Amino acid sequence: NRPKAFLWGIFSGVTEPIGALIGWLFFRNGLNLVLYGVMFGIVAGMMVMISLRELLPTAFRYDPKDTIVTNSLIFGMAIMSLSLVLFRVI
């Protein structure tokens, strides 16, 4: 039903500023480089987990003969690796 979906949408949108406020309260005095790196590592781990657990199985469901998914995955990893080398992050 539409009103219920609208309320859930508002609820999910309100959680972002609340989370930002909580984050600001924790880190308002500044971040050191170790904490900054740990937070990036945690977020990167969450993104990889979502990709491996949710997105890839769904992609394989829509491409059961694997004509695109694996090649696209490898190409995407190569692009990310190349960008790290070109920007000298490693």
Image (spheres, rainbow, N blue to C red):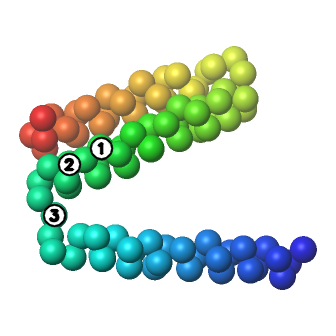
How many neighbours does mark 1 have within 10 angstroms: few (below 14), some (14-19), or many (20 or more)?
few
Quadrant for the N terminus in the image: bottom right
Q: Quadrant of residue 82?
A: top left
Residue 27, position as x, y percentages in the image: 24, 70
Q: Are marks 2 and 1 in contact (CB under 8 Å)?
A: yes
| Residue 2 numbered tag | none
Measure the C-alpha gap from mark 1 to mark 3. Answer: 15 Å
**Between 61 and 19, which is closer to the camera in this rendering?**
19
Look at the numbered disc 1 and give the secondary structure of its residue.
Answer: helix
Q: Residue furthest top?
A: 65
Q: Earlier in the sequence, mark 1 or mark 3?
A: 3
* Residue 23 seen from this side: yes
The residue at 44%/44% (across/down) is: 47
The residue at 30%/37% (across/down) is: 80
Measure the C-alpha gap from mark 2 to mark 3. Answer: 10 Å
| Residue 31 numbered tag | 3
Q: Earlier in the sequence, mark 2 or mark 3?
A: 3
* Residue 86 seen from this side: no
The residue at 32%/28% (across/down) is: 78
Q: Quadrant of residue 63?
A: top right
The residue at 35%/45% (across/down) is: 42
Look at the numbered disc 3 and give the secondary structure of its residue.
Answer: loop
How many neighbours does mark 3 have within 10 angstroms: few (below 14), some (14-19), or many (20 or more)?
few
Q: Disc 1 marks which residue?
A: 41
Q: Nearer the viewer, mark 1 or mark 3?
A: 3
Amino acid at circle 1 = Gly
What count of labels does the image hold? 3
Amino acid at circle 2 = Gly
Residue 38, position as x, y percentages in the image: 25, 47
Amino acid at circle 3 = Leu
**Is the residue 46 above or below the residue 36 in the image?**
above
